Amino acid sequence: MPPSALRDRKKERTRRAILLAAVGLFEARGYEETTVAEIAAEAEVGTRTFFNYFASKEELLFPEPDDRVRAAVAAIATRRPGERPVEVLLRALRAAGDNPAEHLADDLDSRIAALRAQVSRTVPAVSGRAAHAQLIAQREIARHLHGAFPHELDEVGAAALVGAVVGAVSGALTVLFQQAKHGIEDGERLHRKIHETTSRVLQPWLTATPAGQPN
């Protein structure tokens, strides 16, 4: 194996070790109560190494560049014959990972998605970062959705569709977390609740009859 490939594998292992340490601490102690120094110690690296991989604690949950957006864009680009815009959008959001309507293959990704969903709605210091990340993501997804369906959706229509679907899920999840009586729940339990909530909210879009087609 070339030295460059070995370095890349080592970097990925270190990055994943930091993420695993952070997620475990966030789930056990809470996001605000966990420090970068504690995450680094748990991952058995120095704080300088932590900052070589992540610019801040927030970037653990909101990475730059955002692989979720790239996954959504790729899903739109591979739309299937006969798919409606809303079907492509829902599949794109599932590919992005924050809409757990489908099982996430990587348990770490699943835990991060659950933490991101809760922390962004319960920790004021993170809310601004979450809102900005969501706005950028919506703009990019809407741009590609318009490009995929230029005769069905203009730029405004694409933005409205993305905003409606994301807003519906976001609003439902906000209430879900407000009802929680404790801090960050067990990742698997919270993931299941998010799945149930988003599936229920998205059901009208999933079952809607396309315009011009009989019921």
Image (cartoon, rainbow, N blue to C red):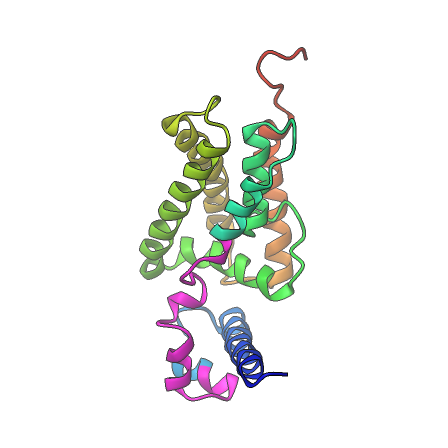
Q: Nearer the viewer, residue 164 or 38?
A: 164
Which residue is at a point 36% across and 47% down the rendered structure image?
Answer: 136
Q: Is residue 60 magenta?
A: yes
Q: With respect to residue 50, does 92 lie above or below?
A: above
From the top left corner, tell me how far across and down residue 58 is, in percent: 38, 66
Is residue 182 found left or right of 126 in the rendered image?
A: right
From the top left corner, tell me how far across and down residue 158 is, in percent: 43, 30
Q: With respect to residue 68, does 93 lie above or below?
A: above
From the top left corner, tell me how far across and down residue 97 is, in percent: 56, 52
Q: Which residues are magenta?
A: 40-68
In the picture, the quarter occupied by the C terminus is: top right
**Residue 126 quadrant:** bottom left
**Residue 142 quadrant:** top left
Q: Is residue 175 magenta?
A: no
Q: How many marks?
A: 0
Q: With respect to residue 28, does 206 lie above or below?
A: above
Which residue is at a point 50% across and 54% down the rendered structure image?
Answer: 68
Which residue is at a point 46% across and 26% down the rendered structure image?
Answer: 150
Q: Nearer the viewer, residue 21 or 28?
A: 21
In the picture, the quarter occupied by the N terminus is: bottom right
Which residue is at a point 45% across and 84% down the rendered structure image?
Answer: 40
From the top left corner, tell me how far across and down residue 157 is, in percent: 41, 26
**Residue 31 quadrant:** bottom left
